[in-house]
Image (cartoon, rainbow, N blue to C red):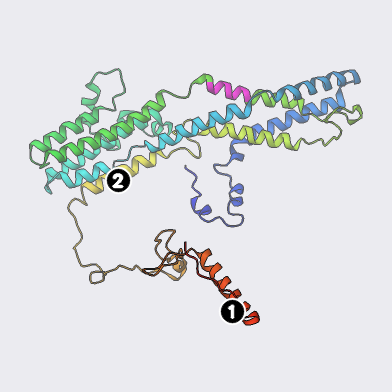
């Protein structure tokens, strides 16, 4: 089940994000705690063997091995390979989400363009959207383990109402070595053309729009199938996994605290617990776990896509839109702003701070000095200098008489 926390981080308040660190479902702790405990146990075992079991000459050999591993472990480009890999996985994950098949646009076209409130018109519209949902179900069965567990055979598809027994016979009699998700698309196209010939679809443009939307829906389904077929190259996944685990295998030996009495460089202090090594393991291994969880979002992890919910929702809303809601309109009345030139929806007291004036541009409040018609334009600096000169002239005349005067300069 997808872990949703959007409402918890709607506002950037104090400790709003910190509270997310305490959640368990979908958390990195749930994914990583087994590997973390194993790493701590292995590190502790090696530390106890070094301190309590080995003889002095064996300790010297272990110390040389530890410093060797610590020196060369940093040459493994863990950050580099992990960064590119996780970026690739996240982009792939998001593209699969964008291409999830939603029948909303199709059901709007079918509800508005396929006419007839009689039983045949109702049957026609419901059959069209049922073929749409059957197409997506066949794709989800082939890519999602959760959906495959729910519909393991075509018999379960028939029992769920996505396909009739007669349609199943026709479906199974069509011999094809390929995945047959496209068969309901053909049924849909032929049935839509038949509806146009019978006058249920009154315009060829409407038929074209319906078929275009069906082609788009089929493209979404084919894209999901393509992502399931062609994954990230196995060699890349192997390189990243080996790089991470090799690095931390070297850290088990290289990050041991050695005897401070030997005065090795960087080993002047014996803390027993390698805090920053454990943090490094948590971050790097957690980074890898993110990629492992997102590489196939149609599994059964906490943050995988809710494919079964999508199937249920799509069938329910599409049948509702083309059947009960077909030409079932509320009575038209004048809106409450009928006689107002400007509509002003009210604000609650809690939302009063969000009532702000319209933005008119960043230069709206910029002050400008306007020059009267017939006069030379003057810059603010010229006006300031003129006023200063005029003040000095009056002061000089009061003290020494009118011996000089200042004239206004124009630019």
Magenta span = 236-243
Crowding near pointer 1: few (<14 within 10 Å), some, many (20+)? few
**Left or right: residue 152 compared with residue 326:** right
Residue matched to label 1: 402
- Answer above or below: position of 205 versus 185: below
Relative depth, front residue between 136 and 214: 214
Rendered residue at 85%/35% (across/down): 269
- Residue shown at the point (72%, 27%) measured from the top left: 251
Question: Left or right of 201: which side holds 165?
Answer: right
View extreme (front): residue:
403
- Image depth: mark 2 or mark 1 in front: 1
State the predominant SS element of the stretch in magenta: helix
At mark 2, the secondary structure is helix
Q: On the rendered structure, is 156 left or right of 113?
A: right
According to the picture, the residue beneath numbered tag 2 turns out to be 316
Tell me, yes or no, if residue 180 can be seen here: yes
Query: Residue 362: x and y, percent?
Result: 44, 58
Q: Alpha-carbon neighbours of circle 2 within 10 Å: few (<14), some, or many (≥20)?
A: few
- Residue at point 77% right, 31% down? 44
Residue 273 locus on image (x, y percent): 78, 36
- Residue 97 appears at what percent x and percent y? 41, 37
Query: How far separated are the C-alphas under marks 2 and 1?
Result: 97 Å
Q: Nearer the viewer, residue 76 or 118?
A: 76
Q: Nearer the viewer, residue 357 or 348?
A: 357
Picture quadrant where residue 243 is located: top right
Residue 216 appears left or right of 11:
left
């Amino acid at each position: 089940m997808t872990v949703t926390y959007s409402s918890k981080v709607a506002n950037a308040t104090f400790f709003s994000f910190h509270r997310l660190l305490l959640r368990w479902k979908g958390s990195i702790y749930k994914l990583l705690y087994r590997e973390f405990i194993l790493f701590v146990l292995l590190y502790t075992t090696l530390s106890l063997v070094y301190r309590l079991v080995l003889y002095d000459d064996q300790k010297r050999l272990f110390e040389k091995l530890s410093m060797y591993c610590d020196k060369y472990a940093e040459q493994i480009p863990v950050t580099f390979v992990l960064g590119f890999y996780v970026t690739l996985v996240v982009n792939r994950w998001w593209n699969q989400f964008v291409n999830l098949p939603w029948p909303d646009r199709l059901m709007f076209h079918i509800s508005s363009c396929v006419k007839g409130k009689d039983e045949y018109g109702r049957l026609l519209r419901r059959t069209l959207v049922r073929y749409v949902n059957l197409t997506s179900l066949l794709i989800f069965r082939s890519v999602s383990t959760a959906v495959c567990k729910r519909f393991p055979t075509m018999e379960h598809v028939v029992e769920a109402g996505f396909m009739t027994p007669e349609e199943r016979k026709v479906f199974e009699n069509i011999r094809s070595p390929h995945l047959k998700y496209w068969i309901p698309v053909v049924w849909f196209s032929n049935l839509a053309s038949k509806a146009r010939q019978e006058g249920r679809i009154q315009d060829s443009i409407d038929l074209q729009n319906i078929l275009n939307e069906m082609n788009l829906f089929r493209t979404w389904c084919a894209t999901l199938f393509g992502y399931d077929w062609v994954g990230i190259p196995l060699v890349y996944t192997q390189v990243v996994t080996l790089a991470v685990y090799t690095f931390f295998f070297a850290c088990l030996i290289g990050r041991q605290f050695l005897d401070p009495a030997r005065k090795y460089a960087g080993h002047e202090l014996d803390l027993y617990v390698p805090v920053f090594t454990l943090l490094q393991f948590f971050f790097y291994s957690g980074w890898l776990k993110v990629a492992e969880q997102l590489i196939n979002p149609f599994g059964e992890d906490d943050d995988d896509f809710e494919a079964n919910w999508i199937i249920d929702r799509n069938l329910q809303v599409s049948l509702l839109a083309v059947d009960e809601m077909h030409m079932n309109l509320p009575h038209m009345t004048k809106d409450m702003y009928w006689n107002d030139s400007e509509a002003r929806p009210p604000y609650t007291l809690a939302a009063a701070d969000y009532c702000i004036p319209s933005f008119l541009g960043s230069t709206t409040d910029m002050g400008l000095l306007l020059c009267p018609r017939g006069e030379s334009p003057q810059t603010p600096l010229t006006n300031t200098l003129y006023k200063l000169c005029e003040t000095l002239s009056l002061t000089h005349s009061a003290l020494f008489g009118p011996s000089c005067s200042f004239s206004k300069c124009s630019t």
